[in-house]
Image: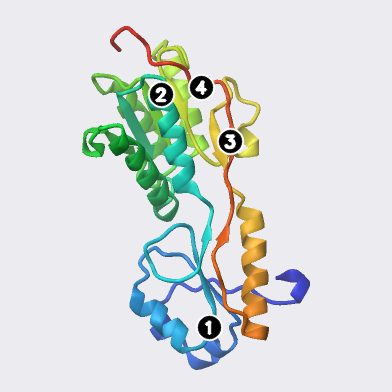
Amino acid sequence: MASLHSAILLISTPPEEWRPEKASSLCGVIVVPQDITTKDLEIIKNRNLPYLIFTESDLPGPGIKLNQRKAAREMTENLLRLGHRRIALLTGYDVCLDAPKRQGVHEALRHAGIDPAQVPEFSTGGKEEGIFHASRALLDSRPRPTAAIAFDDSFGSMLSYHARRQDGLKVPEDLSIISFHDWPYLSFIEPALATARFDFFNAGERAAEALSRSALTGEPLTDLCFEPCYRPGQTVGSAPTTPG
């Protein structure tokens, strides 16, 4: 938006509470689906504002598809192919970003005949200090999982550290770990996490361009789709043959 000399507003109030002068100043809206209803979207449409829904969602309308659900499903399928059946989730990164990952994991589990309700989920509660407690709870659970799906690299890194340094486990021989986001600041930590990167920057850039173009020309909006990029890492291996 800087190249267009346009400002970005972060709005947390429902669309029905937007003042007319605020609504009329907007050329488009990127909708974060948390706590958003179809009624909210109808109000946005009635104000002739083009919008895009950020991340996979059940809300109607064009969206920014980062394919987090696909990545989670494919990475879980790989764990299953390697013989893992005791799998746990380490969640609590962000409500909107967690949801499609959870859906992808559950799809893979159901396809393999595993009830997702039987797969334990340990949440950080969205708090930084919660990463330690959730990681500790996962490692202390019995029977201990042979694989963990961490919904952010920071979770996976913390889990790997405690598994190796405090519990004397080998990664991935005793515990396989996959995570998401491929944050650069964790790229030098060993063993390198098996992770998937999503193109947030390019997605934001293309969304801004599409909204601006739609506002100026009336061009209808369609889904913007992006493919995840996988990094194999060093934290995934076959399920151990001995009980944990």
3D distance between C-alphas at marks 3 and 1? 35 Å
Label whose residue precedes the other's in the sequence (1 or 4): 1
Q: Secondary structure at mark 3?
A: strand
Q: Quadrant of the C terminus?
A: top left
Residue 62 x %, y %: 50, 69
Q: Residues within 10 Å of mark 4 (few under 14, many from 20)?
A: many
Q: Amino acid at mark 4?
A: Thr
The residue to which callout 3 is attached is: 230
Judged left or right of residue 90, residue 158 is right
3D distance between C-alphas at marks 1 and 4? 45 Å
Q: Secondary structure at mark 1?
A: loop
The residue to which callout 1 is attached is: 49
Label whose residue precedes the other's in the sequence (4 or 2): 2
The residue to which callout 4 is attached is: 235
The residue to which callout 2 is attached is: 81
3D distance between C-alphas at marks 2 and 1? 46 Å
Image marks 1 and 4: residues in contact by CB distance under 8 Å: no
Q: Amino acid at mark 1?
A: Leu
3D distance between C-alphas at marks 4 and 3? 13 Å
Residue 105 x %, y %: 37, 39
- Residue drawn at the location 25% of the way across and 32% of the way down: 114
Residue 36 x %, y %: 37, 70
Residue 98 x %, y %: 41, 48
Q: Nearer the viewer, mark 4 or mark 3?
A: 3
Image marks 4 and 3: residues in contact by CB distance under 8 Å: no
Q: Nearer the viewer, mark 2 or mark 1?
A: 2
Q: 23 or 63: which is nearer to us?
A: 63
- Residue drawn at the location 38% of the way across and 51% of the way down: 99
Label whose residue precedes the other's in the sequence (2 or 1): 1
